């Protein structure tokens, strides 16, 4: 029985050609299909909303040379378009972060939150919401509406720095120590968040609830300009890790013999995940299951080759988050359901199926 990197074996229903065969052709077709999926989701997202502005009507007016009304321009270009771009970047960042973490830990159940970055970013946001009014007026004047996103971002980065110091000795980072430290920091962040929630007033509790469940309703060009460079940079760096993550699937020793600088790769992977996740949480709040479900589903279809898995994860993550955002806007229109609830409802059963499949209870 041949052990596979993801916990399955050739003796449990997997044929040799399925395990070792070349699936690059299928991977390319999958990526092409995902490009079409993202384009369709983007068009649907741009035409969906409580304002009643139809994308088709706007296109007709534009083609006929009619000047768009101020209301149409504001809805499309100042509300829906930044929301669309934010959703795509957040979904791509979370999914790619999940794929990198799963490759780093060699475990398909790994998630960006596993190292506590999401919890740290959430604590920073809660601090800003509950205690922001006590900051000096000069800081409030400078930060303005960006106080919560900035606090979330720096909370994620602070968590990453602590994790790095705890898990690194003599220039080498222990992934196992980082995992345990991430769990401890996540629990500590949760406890501190609970204390802040307890002392919050009614209005702050409403803000905390909506932000904690995740939403793209607050997307704007200003917030996008602050977070997009970080997420785009992380998405550009991630594919550079593909070869190293492929080698790491064989073990750290084998990867080192292949000429891979394992420690450097770990450092870059951790910083990439921290930057992408911290920036995503800063602008959208807590959105679960994208990072854990998307890479696993793609791995079943196109195999574990990170050269194809990482770009495919970015596309599927972007498309799924746009789809979840559309559902959140339509299901109780004209009000909006927090997008984190939608992703949990859709991702929870898939995650359960993943667990059952790994235990051999289900085959498909």
Image (cartoon, helix red, strand yellow):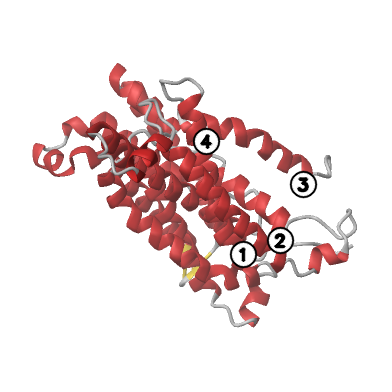
Residue drawn 78% across the image and 44% down it: 357
Marks 2/1: CA–CA distance: 9 Å
Answer with the quarter of the image where residue 83 lies.
top left
Considering the image in quadrants, where does the N terminus appear?
bottom right
Secondary structure at numbered mark 2:
loop
Q: Label 2, on which residue? A: 303
> Which percent across, then down, holds residue 179?
55, 52
| 75 and 57: which is toward the camera | 57
151 left or right of 336 in image? left
Q: Nearer the viewer, mark 3 or mark 1?
A: 1
Contact between labelled residues 2 and 4, with CB atoms less than 8 Å apart: no
Q: Is residue 22 above or below residue 6?
A: below
| 332 and 98: which is toward the camera | 332
Judged from this view, the residue extending furthest toward the top is 202
| 130 and 81: which is toward the camera | 81
Marks 4/2: CA–CA distance: 25 Å
User: In terms of sequence position, does the residue under pointer 4 or pointer 2 come before the other?
Assistant: 2
- Disc 1 crowd, CA 10 A, few/some/many (<14, 14-19, 20+): many
User: In terms of sequence position, does the residue under pointer 2 or pointer 1 come before the other?
Assistant: 2
Res. 112 in view: no
Secondary structure at numbered mark 3:
helix
Residue drawn 28% across the image and 51% down it: 226
Label for residue 324? 4
Q: Label 1, on which residue? A: 308
> Which percent across, then down, holds residue 12?
88, 54
Q: Is residue 280 above or below residue 80?
A: below
> Which percent across, then down, holds residue 316?
57, 50
Res. 41 in view: yes
Residue drawn 54% across the image and 31% down it: 342
């Amino acid at each position: 029985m041949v052990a596979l990197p993801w916990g399955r074996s050739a003796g449990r229903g997997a044929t040799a050609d399925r395990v070792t065969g070349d699936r690059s052709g299928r991977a390319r077709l999958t990526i092409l299909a995902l490009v079409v999926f993202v384009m369709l989701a983007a068009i649907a997202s741009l035409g969906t909303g409580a304002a009643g502005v139809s994308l088709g009507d706007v296109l007709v007016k534009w083609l006929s040379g009619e000047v768009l009304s101020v209301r149409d321009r504001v809805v499309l270009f100042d509300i829906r378009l930044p929301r669309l771009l934010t959703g795509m970047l957040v979904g791509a960042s979370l999914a790619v972060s999940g794929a990198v973490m799963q490759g780093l830990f060699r475990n398909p159940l790994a998630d960006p939150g596993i190292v506590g970055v999401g919890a740290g970013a959430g604590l920073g946001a809660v601090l800003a919401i509950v205690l922001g009014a006590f900051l000096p007026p000069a800081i409030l004047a400078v930060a303005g509406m960006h106080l919560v996103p900035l606090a979330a971002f720096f909370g994620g980065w602070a968590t990453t720095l602590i994790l790095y110091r705890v898990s690194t000795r003599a220039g080498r980072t222990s992934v196992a120590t980082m995992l345990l430290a991430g769990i401890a920091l996540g629990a500590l962040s949760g406890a501190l968040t609970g204390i802040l929630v307890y002392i919050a007033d009614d209005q702050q509790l409403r803000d905390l609830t909506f932000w904690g469940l995740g939403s793209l309703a607050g997307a704007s060009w200003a917030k996008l300009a602050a977070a997009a460079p970080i997420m785009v940079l992380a998405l550009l760096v991630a594919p550079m890790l593909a070869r190293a993550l492929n080698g790491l699937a064989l073990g750290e020793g084998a990867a080192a013999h292949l000429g891979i600088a394992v420690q450097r790769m770990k450092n870059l992977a951790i910083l990439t995940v921290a930057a992408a996740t911290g920036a995503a949480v800063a602008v959208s709040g807590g959105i679960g299951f994208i990072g854990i479900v998307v890479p696993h589903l793609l791995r079943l279809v196109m195999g574990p080759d990170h050269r194809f898995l990482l770009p495919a994860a970015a596309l599927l993550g972007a498309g799924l988050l746009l789809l979840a955002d559309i559902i959140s806007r339509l299901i109780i229109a004209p009000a909006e359901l927090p997008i984190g609830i939608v992703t949990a409802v859709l991702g929870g059963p898939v995650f359960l199926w993943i667990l059952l499949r790994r235990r051999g209870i289900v085959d498909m």
